[in-house]
Image (tube, helix red, strand yellow):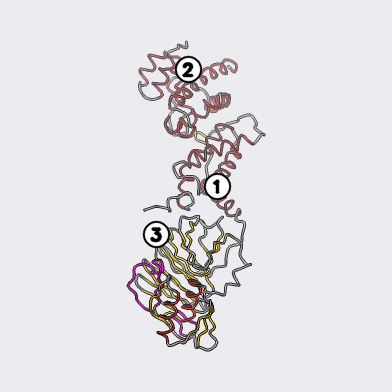
């Protein structure tokens, strides 16, 4: 028996796809382009496109459809500014640095410094690193969304971390 | 100090293949601490707030505003809700006078010629089998969202489950969710049979009948609703027959017209009769004979015109 209700055109399926992918898609666009308002606009546009194509896009391919469309829409928008990323901080987790006085920075300072370093990362490294550390996606999940191999994601994430360390050391030298 | 093989060590550490203690040894204490600081900091971050519901609302509004055509007017039923069923099927035969539909609505129209049968897939996955000389009109852009269509003639609907499904015709409308049913309808009369699940049908005066499996009701402007039961498990017209059961004569004539292309001159007879019986779609002459002889109506065939007396 066919199951036509399991189509992207079905309201519930569509909402389910939104719940599953919209936030990750927004964050991905944010990590890439550093503009929250536009990221949400393009999430909206991507989902509108998905609705328009709901007959053609299978549920399985909806995720890559959304990420591809979202990125393409954003790239077509020529007015890219410099990436500026801002994050909120939960205060619940103890900071490892608090254990060692050598590495205690005043809260805000280290955050600002690291945000700047992250914005300077090559795009590929930045996206993979933040998807992993903030969205808590596995390498496999990131690889699926970016349509890359897990090996490539691994390389980008460790590359990002090395890059950040160098930048942080550099920035600390300048600022101290 | 950076070592070339730090790459692998970092990878192993990030993937949890080696623990913090091992990483500290392999990377060196200073580097390890710097890495750890970065990760600990980032791990406490969250993205700016996310209001998914509000965004979804916006998307829905945007999707809805893409509708190019006005929605057909629907008389809401209100308190009927059915949440059954996987696939529902609907058969509808709607009468001749559909003037009010034409011109008022835009959308896609599917039509069949006399004697032709055609299968149409709707955007929501439902399938319509159109009988001869029939048409449906729907707005394909928003159909998946708002499942309303207008029907002229006769059709078999296999309706996928989901929010509401409504078929509008001049003498009433049918609302379905998770059922199989048939409707035969004319300007002032219709006949509804439920093959599975549950159906609500409402006449144009707002009177409602709820039918479950094996139940039928017909309606005429004069007699109101009449209930009956039946045993078939699917509409026989799909097999090349039409099964009438106490069917008002105008609907019988409508079927003969749709199937065979006859037109009838009825000035000399009373239309206040009903017919029960089965006619084969492959034998027009036999069909006429079966209907009119059993009703005691004289008839004369002149090409495609039938004079009744």
Residue located at (47% from left, 59% from top): B119
Residue located at (50% from left, 42% from top): A22
Q: Residue furthest front?
A: B303
Q: CA distance from mark 3 to mark 1?
A: 32 Å
Residue mark closest to the camera, 2 vs 3: 3
- Mark 3: which secondary structure? strand
- Mark 1: which secondary structure? helix
Residue A90 on the magenta span: no
Q: Residue B221 vs residue B286: left or right?
A: right
Residue mark closest to the camera, 1 vs 2: 1
- Mark 2: which secondary structure? helix
What range is drawn magenta here?
A: B219-244
- The answer to whether residue A121 is above or below residue B243 is above
Residue beneath label 2, please?
A102
- The answer to whether residue B182 is above or below residue A169 is below
Report if the CB atoms under discs 1 and 2 are less than 8 Å apart: no
Chain assignment, label 3: B
Q: Position of residue B241 (x, y in %)?
A: 40, 71
Q: Residues within 10 Å of mark 1 (few under 14, many from 20)?
A: some
Residue beneath label 3, please?
B87
Chain assignment, label 1: B
Q: Position of residue B30 (x, y in %)?
A: 45, 14
Q: Are marks 2 and 3 on the same chain?
A: no
Taking depth in this image into account, of B13 and B21 the one nearest to the observer is B13
Chain assignment, label 2: A
Residue beneath label 1, please?
B55
Q: Residue B69 vs residue B7: left or right?
A: right
Q: Position of residue B141 (x, y in %)?
A: 56, 55
């Amino acid at each position: 028996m066919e199951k036509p209700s399991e189509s992207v055109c079905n309201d519930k399926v569509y909402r389910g796809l939104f719940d599953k992918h919209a936030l990750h898609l927004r964050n991905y666009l944010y990590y890439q382009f550093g503009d929250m308002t536009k990221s949400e606009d393009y999430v909206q546009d991507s989902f509108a496109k998905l609705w328009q194509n709901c007959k053609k896009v299978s549920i399985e391919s909806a995720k890559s459809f959304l990420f591809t469309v979202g990125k393409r829409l954003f790239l077509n928008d020529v007015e890219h500014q410099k990436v500026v990323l801002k994050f909120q901080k939960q205060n619940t987790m103890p900071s490892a640095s608090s254990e060692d006085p050598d590495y205690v920075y005043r809260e805000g300072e280290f955050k600002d410094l690291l945000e700047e370093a992250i914005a300077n990362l090559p795009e590929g490294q930045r996206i993979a690193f933040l998807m992993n550390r903030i969205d808590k996606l596995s390498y496999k999940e990131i690889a699926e969304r970016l349509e890359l191999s897990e090996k490539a994601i691994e390389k980008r994430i460790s590359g990002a971390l090395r890059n950040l360390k160098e930048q942080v050391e550099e920035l600390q030298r300048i600022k101290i | 100090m950076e070592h070339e093989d730090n790459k692998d060590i970092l990878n192993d550490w990030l993937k949890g293949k080696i623990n913090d203690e091992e990483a500290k040894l392999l990377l060196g204490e200073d580097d390890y601490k710097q890495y750890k600081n970065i990760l600990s900091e980032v791990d406490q971050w969250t993205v700016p707030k996310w209001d998914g519901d509000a965004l979804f609302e916006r998307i829905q509004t945007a999707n809805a505003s893409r509708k190019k055509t006005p929605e057909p007017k629907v008389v809401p039923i209100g308190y009927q809700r059915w949440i059954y069923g996987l696939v529902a099927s609907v058969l509808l035969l709607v009468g001749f006078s559909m003037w009010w539909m034409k011109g008022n609505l835009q959308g896609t129209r599917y039509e069949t010629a006399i004697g032709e049968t055609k299968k149409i897939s709707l955007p929501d996955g439902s399938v319509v089998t159109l009988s001869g000389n029939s048409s449906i009109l729907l707005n394909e852009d928003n159909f998946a969202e708002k499942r309303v269509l207008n029907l002229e003639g006769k059709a078999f609907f296999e309706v996928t489950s989901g929010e509401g499904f409504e078929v509008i015709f001049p003498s009433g409308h049918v609302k379905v969710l998770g059922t199989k049913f048939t409707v035969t309808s004319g300007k002032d009369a219709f006949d509804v049979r439920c093959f599975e699940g549950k159906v609500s049908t409402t006449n144009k005066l707002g009177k409602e009948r709820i039918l479950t499996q094996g139940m039928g009701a017909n309606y005429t402007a004069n007699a109101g609703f009449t209930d009956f039961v039946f045993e078939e498990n699917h509409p026989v017209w799909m097999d090349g027959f039409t099964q009438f059961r106490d069917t008002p004569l105008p609907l019988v004539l409508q079927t003969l017209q749709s199937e065979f292309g006859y037109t009838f001159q009825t000035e000399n007879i009373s239309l206040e009769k009903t017919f029960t019986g089965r006619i084969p779609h492959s034998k027009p002459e036999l069909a006429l004979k079966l209907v009119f002889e059993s009703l005691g109506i004289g008839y004369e065939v002149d090409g495609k015109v039938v004079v009744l007396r």
